[in-house]
Image: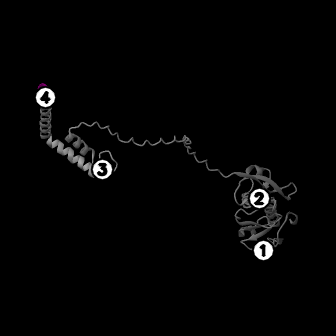
Amino acid sequence: MAASGKKKKSSGFGWLLFWLAFLIGVTLLFVVNREKIQNSLSILKDLVADPEARPGVPGSDVSAADTDETDAASGVAVDRPAVEPPAAAVEPAPPPLPDTPSAPPAVQPQAAPPAVQPGTVKRQVYLIRLDNDGGLVAAKVERSLPSGDSPMRDALEAVIRGPSADEAKRNLLSLIPENVTILGATVRGSTAYIDFSEDFLFNTYGIEGYAGQLRQVVWTATEFGNVKDVQILIEGKRLDYLGEGIWIGSPLSRDSL
């Protein structure tokens, strides 16, 4: 019984030493890590007071740098997943532009056409033929004249110029005085009004000469389809007679001469 009591006493003493050593060790650890433990307790206190301040919680004001410092202070290594920045938005590629039609070839400037020279036209005019009996007959000849704005005046001026050398050999002549000029030539209705200078009043061939010069004027003017008769004017005035009693006070036709 004494031995059993001694064994129990020895066993109780051993446990006392164990707990004493444990308390001493805990105390030493606390003293050594006092600053770290205080920091951890302070952080724990703040987390309990403000749960929204936890790292990683939406709305927390604790930055990543603060979290890193807290982890360093606690001495606990924390592996944090690397936060990758959000991928940049990729804009869709613009649709391909339609094929642009090629520009038309440049048009080379063309040289201006040469100026058109006035053309000519064939006109029938009248001279006087002296026949074998001495009579005066109106004779038609052809002239190439400019196609101008006053075709009747051009034709009468060709009559005043007289026959060509070949026509003169064929006994053709003009009885209109050489110094006569045409002051005007117009058509009103079916009547042509021909205005001559005063020289038209003087013909050295007498009455036959006056009749011949009137035939030349009237026959040439009535070659134009819109003219049926001719009114003779002298210096813009209408006279009754030409020379020795040849009537010119009204329009003259081929039948009246």
Closer to viewer: mark 4 or mark 2: 4
Q: Is residue 187 above or below residue 129?
A: below
Closer to viewer: mark 2 or mark 1: 1
* For marks 2 and 1 on the same chain, the one whose residue lies earlier in the sequence: 2
Q: Residues within 10 Å of mark 2 (few under 14, many from 20)?
A: many
Q: Secondary structure at mark 2?
A: loop
Q: Residues within 10 Å of mark 1 (few under 14, many from 20)?
A: some
* Residue behind mark 1: 239
The dominant secondary structure in magenta is helix
Q: Residues within 10 Å of mark 3 (few under 14, many from 20)?
A: few
Task: Report if the CB atoms under discs 4 and 3 are less than 8 Å apart.
Answer: no
* For marks 2 and 3 on the same chain, the one whose residue lies earlier in the sequence: 3
* Residue behind mark 3: 51
The Cα–Cα distance between marks 2 and 3, rounded to whole angstroms, is 138 Å
* Residue behind mark 4: 5
- Viewer-closest of 83 and 136: 83
Q: Position of residue 248 (x, y in %)?
A: 81, 71
Residue numbers of the magenta segment = 1-9
* For marks 4 and 2 on the same chain, the one whose residue lies earlier in the sequence: 4
Q: Position of residue 117 (x, y in %)?
A: 65, 51
* Residue behind mark 2: 174
Amino acid type of disc 3?
Pro
Q: Secondary structure at mark 1?
A: loop
Q: Secondary structure at mark 3?
A: helix
- Viewer-closest of 254 and 225: 225
Residue drawn at the location 22% of the way across and 43% of the way down: 70
Closer to viewer: mark 3 or mark 1: 3
The Cα–Cα distance between marks 4 and 1, rounded to whole angstroms, is 192 Å
The Cα–Cα distance between marks 3 and 1, rounded to whole angstroms, is 137 Å
